[in-house]
């Protein structure tokens, strides 16, 4: 029996070799529930499921700045895009989504920068060679693929090395949804194939064994042009996980002050449940947890 909230995975074996000479074989099953390091629980937060989501939000509209606007935007590091911030409704409306996506509440965010893609194997390898990061437990060898097998501490260290930080949960969701409350980064339509994201469609992962190279699904871009916010690899955020949100209006929220799990977002290439790729879907993972479909994307405070 699958524990409440445990990721349901097709059986999969991966042979992984990093650019650093690491080699590992991974065997995953739908009922896997324990961390490979230290016995830390794979799933801290109990996730009771609801019926299918109801009521799609209004048709999405783009909020990407125009060419004229971009000339006056604050500067972001290479590879990052500027998210202008603003007001949005975080979480799912009553009767939609999972219990921990409630209550829906108003969030106001200042502008920030976010990496257009997930961090690659090559980028993380540079951090290891500089002595600022420790080796990931698992990843694939291709340099353009997202690094995986990194726990929360490793992800935090990597973002600090590149001059950034992990995004807050609110920043991550806003980058994926914009201001129009879309269900997925690209809009409200459920994925019906592999064009917009790398996930398990039918009986196999869209990219075969392992994730796709970052940015391989441009039609799945968010309203700000951020890629791979659904599928490919899950992504750590900076927030501690809570079973429900604070209903009050929040400005630049950073989540609970303490907890036992950190929030991950976005779904992975090995997930066959479409709901896990929704922009509001959340998971809580022990900070020491690592997996072959869990990676990192960094945020930055823009410069003027």
Image: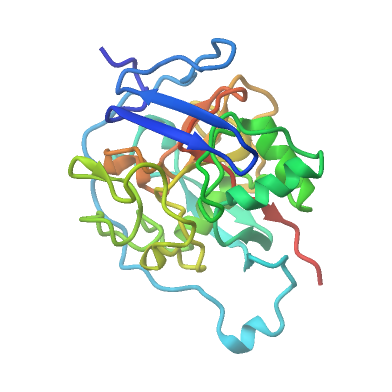
Is residue 36 visible from the viewing direction of this image? yes
Left or right of 209 on screen, residue 88: right
Is residue 93 visible from the viewing direction of this image? no
Q: Where 144 falls versus 44 (above or below)?
A: below
The coloring applied to the image is: rainbow
- Measured as percent of width and height from the top left, residue 183 is found at 35, 54
Residue occupying image coordinates x 43% and y 33%: 15
Front in this rendered view, residue 276 or 181: 276
Image quarter hosting the C terminus: bottom right
- Measured as percent of width and height from the top left, residue 33 is found at 41, 16
- Measured as percent of width and height from the top left, residue 299 is found at 67, 53
Q: Where 1 falls versus 28 (above or below)?
A: above
Residue occupying image coordinates x 42% and y 62%: 216
Front in this rendered view, residue 148 or 94: 148
Image quarter hosting the N terminus: top left
Q: Residue extending furthest bottom?
A: 68
């Amino acid at each position: 029996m699958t524990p409440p909230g445990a990721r349901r995975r097709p059986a999969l074996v991966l042979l992984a070799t990093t650019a650093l000479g690491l080699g590992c074989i991974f065997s995953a099953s739908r009922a896997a529930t324990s961390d490979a390091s230290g016995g830390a629980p794979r799933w801290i937060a109990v996730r009771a499921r609801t019926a299918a989501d109801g009521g799609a939000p209004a048709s999405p509209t783009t909020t990407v700045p125009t060419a004229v606007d971009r000339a006056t935007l604050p500067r972001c590091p290479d590879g990052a895009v500027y998210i202008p911030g603003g007001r949005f409704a975080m979480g799912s409306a009553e009767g939609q989504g999972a219990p921990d996506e409630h209550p829906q509440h108003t969030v106001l965010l200042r502008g920030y920068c976010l990496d257009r893609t997930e961090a690659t194997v090559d980028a993380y390898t540079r951090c290891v060679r500089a002595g600022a990061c420790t080796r990931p437990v698992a990843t694939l060898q291709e340099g353009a693929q997202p690094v995986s097998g990194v726990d929360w501490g490793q992800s935090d260290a990597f973002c600090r090395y590149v001059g950034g930080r992990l995004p807050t949960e609110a920043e991550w969701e806003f980058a994926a949804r914009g201001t129009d409350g879309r269900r997925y980064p690209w809009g409200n339509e459920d994925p019906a194939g592999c064009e917009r994201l790398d996930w398990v469609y039918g009986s196999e992962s869209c990219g075969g064994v392992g994730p796709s190279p970052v940015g391989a699904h441009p039609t799945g871009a968010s309203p700000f042009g951020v890629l791979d916010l659904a599928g490919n690899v899950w992504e750590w955020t900076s927030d501690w996980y809570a079973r429900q949100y604070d209903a009050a209006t929040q400005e630049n929220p950073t989540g609970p002050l303490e907890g036992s799990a950190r929030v991950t977002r976005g779904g992975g290439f090995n997930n066959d449940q479409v709901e896990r790729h929704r922009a509001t879907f959340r998971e809580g993972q022990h900070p020491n947890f690592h997996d072959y479909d869990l990676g990192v994307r960094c945020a930055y405070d823009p410069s003027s």
